[in-house]
Each structure stands twice: as C-alpha cells, then as structure tokens.
Amino acid sequence: MWQIILKLIGSIIVLFGIILIYDARIITKKFFGFGDQNEASNGLKILGFIIAIVGGLILYFV
C-alpha cells in the first residue's frame, strides 16, 4: 500500500518538475519584468530539472 502511495507521489513530483521546465517562460512573464525574464526562466528550468530528478529517484528506489 505504501509503495503505491510513494510511487504516486514520485510521479506527481516528476510531473511538476517537467511542467516547470517547459512552462518556465510563461511563468516568468506573469511574475517578473522584462529585464529579469531570461535569468528567472533559466532558474526555473534548473529548479524543474532538480525536482524531476528527485521524483525520479523516489520512483527508482521504491
């Protein structure tokens, strides 16, 4: 039972990371000015990549 729950949580974390990677430009247009968009989108892509790796590790070890 706990394995199923952890796999579901890991899948959701991976999905959230992938959404951050692909929609980083759209998210930064909503929250940042024009000068900070490139740096903020790169930061969100890196954060999404790290989050996706963490979710993948959860899926791998469970």
Image: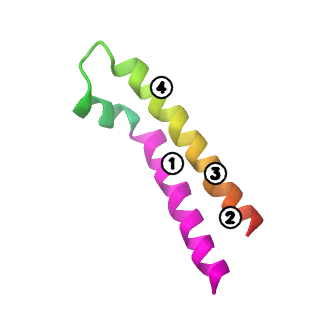
> Badge 2 is on which residue?
59
Disc 4 versus disc 1: distance between alpha carbons? 13 Å
Q: Residues within 10 Å of mark 2 (few under 14, many from 20)?
A: some
Magenta stretch: dominant SS?
helix
What residue span does the magenta drawing correspond to?
1-23
The crowd level at tag 1 (other Cα within 10 Å; few <14, some 14-19, many 20+) is many
Residue 27, image quadrant: top left
Q: Residue at x 65, y 48 (%)?
A: 53
Tell me what residue is drawn at x 61 percent, y 72 percent.
6
Left or right placement of residue 32 versus residue 45 in this view: left
Q: Secondary structure at mark 3?
A: helix
Residue 2 - label = none
The mark nearer the N terminus, 3 or 2, is 3
Query: Which residue is pictured at 40% across the width and 35% down the height?
Result: 24
- Amino acid at dot 2: Leu
Q: Is 37 drawn above or below residue 23 in the view shown?
A: above
Which residue was labeled with disc 4?
A: 42
